[in-house]
Every structure is written in structure tokens, then in C-alpha cells.
């Protein structure tokens, strides 16, 4: 139960559902890379959960999830998103 004046942010799934209801596609880019081989199990688990959350948000909204571990992959993701979301504007 929330109280008046409290800051209650939406969960990623709630935000994705709101975006989907409004017809907004969300494209996510995971730019975190892989955890180092000696990373703690909880860090690997958190990283995996984060990737899954990004995938779910994109899927729920009709968008797409990308992964980029280099500048070239990030640029490729931006270019693909740009190609997917072209809109004609009349002035």
C-alpha cells in the first residue's frame, strides 16, 4: 500500500506494460558485457537477471533487445533501430 507523497517507481514489467498499452515500442541495448570469469555467483546471477529483464521489456512492447559488447556492435544496434523506426513527417 502506498502513501501519499511516496515515490513508488514502476518495475520494468509495469513500465513495459504501460508502454505497450500506449503503443510504444521499447528497444533495449545490453551494453554491460559478460562478467569476468572470477565474478561472484551473485554478480553473475544479477547480470543474467538484468539481461532477461531487458529482453522481456522489449518483447512485451513489440520492440527488440540488442546486446553490444563493443562500439561497433553498439553502432550496429543504433543503426538497426533507426532503420526499424523510420517515420515520415509532413511539414
Image (tube, rainbow, N blue to C red):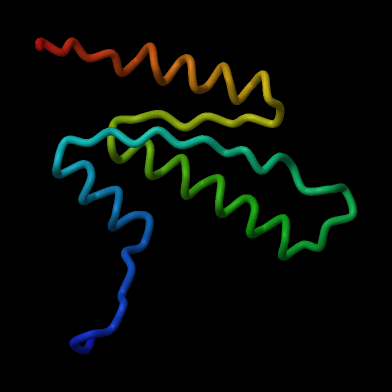
Residue 69: name its quadrant. top right
Whether residue 32 sits left or right of residue 86 in the image: it is right
- Residue 29 lies left or right of residue 43; in this view the side is left
**Quadrant of the snapshot with the C terminus:** top left
Q: Nearer the viewer, residue 69 or 88?
A: 88
Q: How many marks?
A: 0
**Image coords of residue 15 (percent x, y):** 29, 54
Where is residue 85, by image quadrant? top left
Residue 45 horizontal/vertical position (percent): 66, 58
- Residue 19: percent from the left, percent from the top? 23, 45
Task: Return the residue found at the far right.
Answer: 38
Identify the residue at horizontal 52%, vertical 29% (top origin): 66
Residue 28 image offset from top left, x and y in percent: 45, 37
If the image is split into quadrants, where does the N terminus sit? bottom left
Residue 64 vs 47, above or below: the answer is above
Q: Is residue 3 above or below residue 40?
A: below
Residue plotted at (62% across, 38% down): 31
Q: Residue at x 20, y 51 (%)?
A: 18
> Residue most toward the left?
91
Please name the residue shown 28% across and 37% down the image: 61
Taking the image as shown, residue 75 lies to the left or right of residue 8, namely right
Q: In this orientation, which residue lies closer to the viewer: 90 or 26?
A: 90
Query: In the shown orientation, is residue 30 left or right of residue 3?
Result: right
Amino acid at each position: 500500500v502506498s502513501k501519499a507523497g511516496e515515490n513508488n517507481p514502476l518495475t520494468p514489467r509495469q513500465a513495459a506494460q504501460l508502454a505497450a498499452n500506449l503503443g510504444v515500442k521499447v528497444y533495449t541495448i545490453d551494453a554491460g558485457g559478460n562478467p569476468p570469469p572470477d565474478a561472484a555467483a551473485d554478480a553473475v546471477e544479477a547480470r543474467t537477471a538484468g539481461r532477461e529483464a531487458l529482453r522481456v521489456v522489449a518483447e512485451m512492447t513489440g520492440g527488440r533487445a540488442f546486446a553490444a559488447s563493443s562500439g561497433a556492435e553498439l553502432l550496429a544496434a543504433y543503426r538497426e533501430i533507426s532503420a526499424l523506426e523510420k517515420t515520415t513527417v509532413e511539414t
